[in-house]
Amino acid sequence: MRVALPVILIAFVLAAPLSARAGCRWEWICDEGSNCSHQPICDSSIDIVPPEPPSLQPIVPPSIKPIQPPTLPPIGTEKCELVRRCDSQGNCVWDNICY
């Protein structure tokens, strides 16, 4: 029993950074015409979605979607598409999201 406790503590300390990176967060997802929706973005399909926090929709300037090269979606997903991820200040980036 005395040996098992240090091993468990070491395993917990090593696994803590991995669990801190996993999870879901709410982000504004916008299209080319600046129509936005508040959606959860998760690192894994088994992550638990947290309750939606209150947030105002950002004012986003229109943008043209970049050309997406053909790619195969990762295992466990059906398709990937380019979406604009925006913060509450209206700062947006085009990102590839698979689902």
Image (cartoon, rainbow, N blue to C red):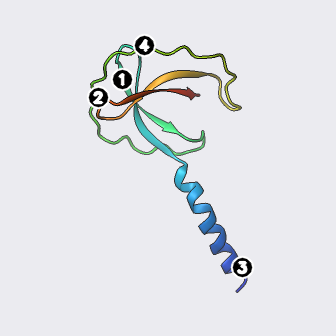
**Residue flagged by tag 2: what amino acid is it?**
Pro
Identify the residue at horizontal 60%, vertical 39% (top origin).
Answer: 45
**Residue flagged by tag 1: what amino acid is it?**
Cys
The residues tagged by marks 1 and 3 sit, at their Cα atoms, a distance apart of: 51 Å
**Residue flagged by tag 4: what amino acid is it?**
Ile
The residue to which callout 4 is attached is 64
The residues tagged by marks 4 and 3 sit, at their Cα atoms, a distance apart of: 57 Å
Q: Are marks 2 and 1 in contact (CB under 8 Å)?
A: yes
Q: Going by the image, does 11 lie left or right of 40?
A: right
Q: Position of residue 78 (x, y in %)?
A: 65, 24
Q: Secondary structure at mark 4?
A: loop
Q: Are marks 3 and 2 in contact (CB under 8 Å)?
A: no
Q: Quadrant of the N terminus?
A: bottom right
The residue to which callout 2 is attached is 58
Mark 4 Cα within 10 Å, few/some/many (few <14, many 20+)? few
**Residue flagged by tag 3: what amino acid is it?**
Ala
Which comes sooner in the sequence, label 4 or label 2? 2
Q: Is residue 67 above or below residue 37?
A: above
* Labelled disc at residue 36: 1
Nearer to us: label 4 or label 2: 4
The residue to which callout 3 is attached is 4
Which comes sooner in the sequence, label 4 or label 3? 3
Task: Name the foreground residue: 5 vs 85.
Answer: 85
Mark 2 Cα within 10 Å, few/some/many (few <14, many 20+)? some
Which comes sooner in the sequence, label 2 or label 1? 1
Nearer to us: label 4 or label 3: 4
Q: Going by the image, does 74 lie left or right of 53?
A: right
Which comes sooner in the sequence, label 1 or label 3? 3
Identify the residue at horizontal 62%, vertical 22% (top origin).
Answer: 79
